[in-house]
């Protein structure tokens, strides 16, 4: 109340001063000249500062974008190593001994989408391929020595393989009955390495991966990189640097693992060269972007600012010519804007405008309350920066909006979670409208973020109470059945595994240690299940001490589904084994598990449940604390 009173008193004083001023034309003309002079000087100061700030913003956007590609590349590399490990597991089950058996086994497990070449070496130091001409001695090679000792290894440079081919070599130990029986090598040739780089940059960016010796390991399929073929330090010496930096300093910074951005001239074009280290050996990801492309949005802002300056000067002239009306109206407008600003902040609403070409987003309203002070002060940010504030389940928002626009829709709506300053997440409703040109191409995406946290949380709480087991927080039996049925209906082509988990000796815990300890056993099991499986899987308590899990096999792991299902089952048996005690009595709780795979062992919840239950019965009757896959033989039993 005190603040509003002060505002009204101040406003009244200013309005009275203006009324007195406009009655004296001489004083008004002097003021007009003074204001025009101040405006002219302000513009002279404003433009250089604006240009400098916008350029710095463009550079930071380049670094942020390169970091995203770094994360994509590291994820792709990790997946390759996982694929080779699964292949090694399959090879270990086959236990090939002779050369012929090794060649046949490699032919069976090889997936051309993963590696260009596979070799397997036993302790004789010879790596055998699918054909005799692919055999090679590997004695003394670091990959062989370390993997034979149980390590997973990736070579830190391109290694000559055969003829003119060089490759990055992955290697994993292969276990025969728990002991290392050999080493499996996976080779990715230079062009295959480049395909990985190109795949992580669908928008055609110019990207290079460089090793510690400055050798170019691979590059994306961008026209700007057609002539780059030699070691990277050769080009560091050829580039012309705007800030007169010495190429030796750049090499030193790369060896120190620093991220940097330089303005260079390459191929007659002004470019940004961004260097970001990878968490793989001492490799670097290098991005080359033409300055004109990188600063497209910034130059657009400068043009708008120039037009605005002209427009503002004209408007100020008109305002000064009609000061008695215009100044008073401007005060009314300020007052109205203040009211709307208060409303925006009160409703926690943010309006946005996004340029799909530059990915620049202009924000207004309760920006500080939603994204924090730093974003609010920036006003305009890169779309990538805002996506970092979304919950991991909502990271596909930009693709979903782009898809809706590409399908010709005029509007898009959804609910998302946005990270708060305290690290938690709040619910917001996203409404986006597509503004198109005469040809139907999207020019701008405008919309709003409206805080619906209270409403969404209330709905989620009510839904959660109806869907979940009160003790463990897992899905109840009805919801588990509905979830599995809906998943199969939504993706009938997918691969899934249905586990039924029954606790051994649970009744003894209740009888001897009490129901409070029994409840602790159930909550402990639910916590371990949540750690073992991810948010895409379904975990439920069917009743008593019986649990169920629907494992959703990722598409890129479908060729190794059986191995992944068995690894999960083995880990369950190991992790769910726990001893409980009251100080005098010790009872060990274990788990018996039955497994049915979709679609070969059931195409509906009812079939999967029935067959997994038969497999569980077999586990119980053959010693407990084990897992069993469904077999048609169980029907006869």
Image (cartoon, rainbow, N blue to C red):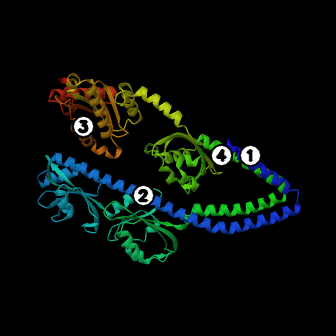
Can you tell which of label 3 and label 4 is closer to the viewer?
A: 4
Mark 3 or mark 4, which has the lower sequence index?
4
Mark 2 or mark 3, which has the lower sequence index?
2
Which quadrant: the C terminus?
top left
Distance from the alpha carbon under mark 2 to that under mark 3: 35 Å
What residue is disc 4 on? Answer: 341
Q: Which mark is residue 572?
A: 3
The crowding category of the residue bearing disc 2, from other C-alpha atoms within 10 Å (few below 14, some 14 to 19, many at least 20), is many
Q: Which mark is residue 215?
A: none
The crowding category of the residue bearing disc 3, from other C-alpha atoms within 10 Å (few below 14, some 14 to 19, many at least 20), is many
In the current view of this chain or complex, which residue is farthest to the top?
Answer: 511
Q: Which mark is residue 8?
A: 1
Distance from the alpha carbon under mark 4 to that under mark 2: 38 Å
What residue is disc 2 on? Answer: 69
Could you tell me if the residues under marks 2 and 1 are in contact, i.e. CB atoms within 8 Å? no
Q: Secondary structure at mark 3?
A: helix
């Amino acid at each position: 109340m005190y603040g509003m009173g002060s505002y009204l008193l101040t406003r009244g004083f200013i309005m009275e001063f203006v009324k007195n001023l406009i009655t004296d034309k001489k004083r008004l003309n002097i003021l007009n000249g003074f204001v025009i002079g101040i405006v002219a000087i302000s513009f002279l100061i404003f433009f250089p500062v604006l240009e400098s700030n916008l350029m710095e913003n463009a550079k930071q956007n380049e670094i942020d974008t390169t970091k995203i590609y770094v994360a994509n590349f590291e994820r792709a590399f990790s997946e390759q190593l996982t694929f080779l490990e699964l292949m090694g597991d399959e090879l270990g089950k086959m236990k090939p001994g002779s050369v012929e058996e090794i060649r046949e086994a490699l032919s069976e497990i090889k997936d051309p989408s993963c590696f260009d070449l596979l070799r397997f070496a036993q302790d004789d130091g010879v790596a055998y391929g699918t054909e005799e001409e692919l055999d090679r001695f590997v004695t003394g090679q670091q990959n062989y020595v370390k993997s034979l000792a149980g390590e997973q290894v990736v070579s830190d440079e391109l290694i000559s393989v055969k003829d003119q081919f060089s490759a990055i070599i992955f290697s994993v130990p292969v276990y025969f009955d728990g002991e290392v029986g050999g080493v499996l090598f996976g080779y990715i040739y230079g062009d295959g390495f480049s395909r990985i780089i190109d795949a992580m940059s669908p928008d055609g960016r110019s990207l290079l991966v460089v090793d510690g010796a400055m050798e170019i390991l691979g590059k994306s399929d961008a026209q700007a990189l057609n002539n780059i073929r030699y070691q990277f330090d050769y080009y560091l010496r050829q580039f012309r640097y705007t800030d007169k930096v010495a190429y030796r300093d750049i090499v030193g910074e790369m060896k120190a693992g620093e991220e940097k951005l330089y303005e260079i001239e390459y191929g007659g074009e002004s470019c940004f060269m961004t260097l970001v280290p990878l968490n793989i050996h001492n490799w670097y990801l290098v991005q080359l972007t033409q300055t004109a492309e990188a600063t497209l949005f910034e130059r657009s802002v400068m043009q708008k600012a120039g037009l605005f300056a002209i427009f503002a000067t004209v408007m100020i002239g008109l305002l000064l010519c009609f000061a008695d009306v215009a100044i008073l109206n401007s005060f009314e407008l300020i007052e109205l804007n203040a009211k709307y600003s208060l409303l925006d902040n009160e409703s926690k609403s943010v309006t946005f405008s996004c340029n799909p070409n530059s990915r620049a987003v202009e924000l207004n309203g309760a920006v500080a309350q939603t994204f924090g002070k730093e974003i609010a002060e920036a006003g305009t940010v890169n779309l990538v920066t805002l996506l970092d504030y979304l919950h991991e389940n909502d990271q596909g928002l930009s693709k979903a909006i782009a898809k809706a626009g590409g399908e010709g829709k005029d509007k898009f709506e959804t609910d998302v979670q946005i990270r708060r300053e305290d690290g938690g997440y709040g619910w917001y409703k996203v409404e986006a409208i597509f503004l198109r040109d005469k040809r139907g191409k999207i020019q701008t995406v405008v919309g709003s973020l409206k805080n619906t946290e209270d409403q969404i949380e209330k709905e989620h709480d009510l839904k959660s109470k109806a869907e979940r087991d009160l003790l463990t927080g897992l899905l109840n039996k009805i919801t588990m059945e509905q979830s599995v049925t809906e998943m199969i209906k939504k993706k009938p082509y997918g691969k899934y595994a249905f586990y039924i988990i029954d606790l051994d000796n649970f009744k003894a815990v209740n009888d001897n240690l009490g129901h409070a300890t029994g409840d602790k056993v159930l909550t402990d099991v639910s916590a371990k299940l949540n750690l073992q499986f991810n948010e895409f899987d379904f975990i439920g308590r069917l009743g008593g001490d019986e649990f169920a899990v629907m494992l959703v096999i990722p598409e890129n792991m479908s060729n190794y589904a059986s191995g992944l299902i068995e690894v999960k089952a083995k880990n369950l048996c190991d992790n769910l084994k726990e001893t409980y005690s009251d100080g005098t009595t010790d009872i060990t709780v274990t788990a018996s598990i039955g497994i049915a795979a979709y679609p070969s062992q059931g195409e509906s919840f009812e079939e999967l449940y029935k067959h997994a239950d038969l497999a569980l019965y077999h586990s119980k009757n053959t010693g407990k604390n084990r897992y069993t896959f469904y077999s048609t033989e169980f029907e006869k039993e």
